[in-house]
Amino acid sequence: MKRQTALSCAAVLFAVTAVAHGAGEPTPAERAVGYRQSVFHVIAGNFGPMAGMVKGEIPFDAKAFALRAERVAFLSTLPLEGFIPDSRVGKTDAKQEIWDNMDDFKAKMESFQTEAGKLAEAAKTASAIDALKPQFGKVGQACKDCHDKYKED
Ligand code: HEC
């Protein structure tokens, strides 16, 4: 058992080293793009089912909604660190305006965090979807406010 653990650790180490030194070694900027896009994917993966409940396409499940809202609130704290300087590289939809207006971009990220936090809080006690619709709308608006200005469509 011990030996097996040691072997798998070696395998993981080898894999990590192989990635770091492989032919397609990503630059820090490329890694940052992958990081922020991955986070947004997971955000959207949790946001979508909530939107389905808001639209009545999916039956309201208070527990599932609360869990997804909590995830989005946490995930909203992550994308900013992926917007490092000079990371408008490769396949990215991030506009140059982000780095030209970083204070405003940060403010938009913060209002997303605030609204997502309020949604998670409200979802803890809500027993009907109607009670969550207005706050869900505010979170959706926060996505849109930022995308309209800073994301290519
Ligand atoms: C403060 C700005 C900001 C906020 C808030 C924001 N986004 Fe984005 N989002 C971006 C930017 C910029 C990109 C482009 C990233 C890239 O391609 O490098 C993006 C990309 C995405 C992508 C595409 C990811 C990919 O693989 O290309 C999805 C999906 C997405 N956002 C969903 C959302 C959702 C859903 C919300 C709200 C719940 C949200 N975003 C909130 C700025 C924001």
Image (cartoon, helix red, strand yellow):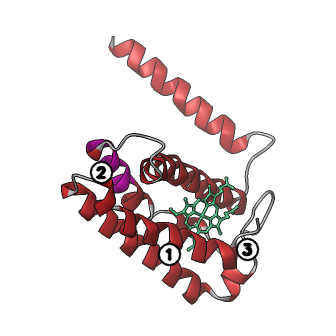
Q: N-terminal of the two: label 3 or label 2? A: 2
Rounded to the nearest angstrom, the CA distance separating label 3 from label 2 is: 37 Å
Which portion, as a residue range, is magenta?
A: 63-71
Q: Indicate the position of residue 97 as horizontal and vertical percent values.
A: 72, 83
Q: Quadrant of residue 145?
A: bottom right
Q: How many residues crowd around disc 1 within 10 Å: few (fewer than 14), some, or many (20 or more)?
A: many
Percent position of residue 80, x then y: 53, 70
Q: Residue furthest top?
A: 1
Q: Quadrant of the N terminus?
A: top left
Q: Are marks 2 and 1 in contact (CB under 8 Å)?
A: no
Which residue lies at the image location 54% right of the left edge and 54% below the top edge?
A: 39
The residue carrying pointer 2 sits among few (fewer than 14), some (14 to 19) or many (20 or more) residues within 10 Å by Cα, namely: many
> Does the closest atom of ligand 1 sit within 8 Å of the Cβ of label 1?
yes
Q: Considering only vertical position in the picture, is 69 above or below 58?
A: below
Give the distance between the C-alpha atoms of the residues marked 2 and 1, in whole angstroms. Answer: 21 Å
Residue beneath disc 3: 86
Q: Nearer the viewer, mark 2 or mark 1?
A: 2
Look at the numbered disc 1 and give the secondary structure of its residue: helix
Tag of residue 66: 2
Residue type at tag 1: Met
- Given residues 90 and 3, the one toward you in this image is 90
Main secondary structure found in the magenta portion = helix
Label 3 or label 1, whichever lies nearer to me, is: 1
Mark 2 Cβ inside 8 Å of ligand 1: no
Of the numbered discs in the image, which one, if any, rests on residue 109?
A: 1
Magenta stretch: residue 41 in it? no
Ligand 1 in which quarter: bottom right
Q: Residue at x 76, y 79 (%)?
A: 96
Q: Earlier in the sequence, mark 2 or mark 1?
A: 2
The amino acid sitting under disc 2 is Ala
In this rendering, would 79 be left or right of 65?
A: right
Residue 126 image position (x, y, % from top left): 22, 56
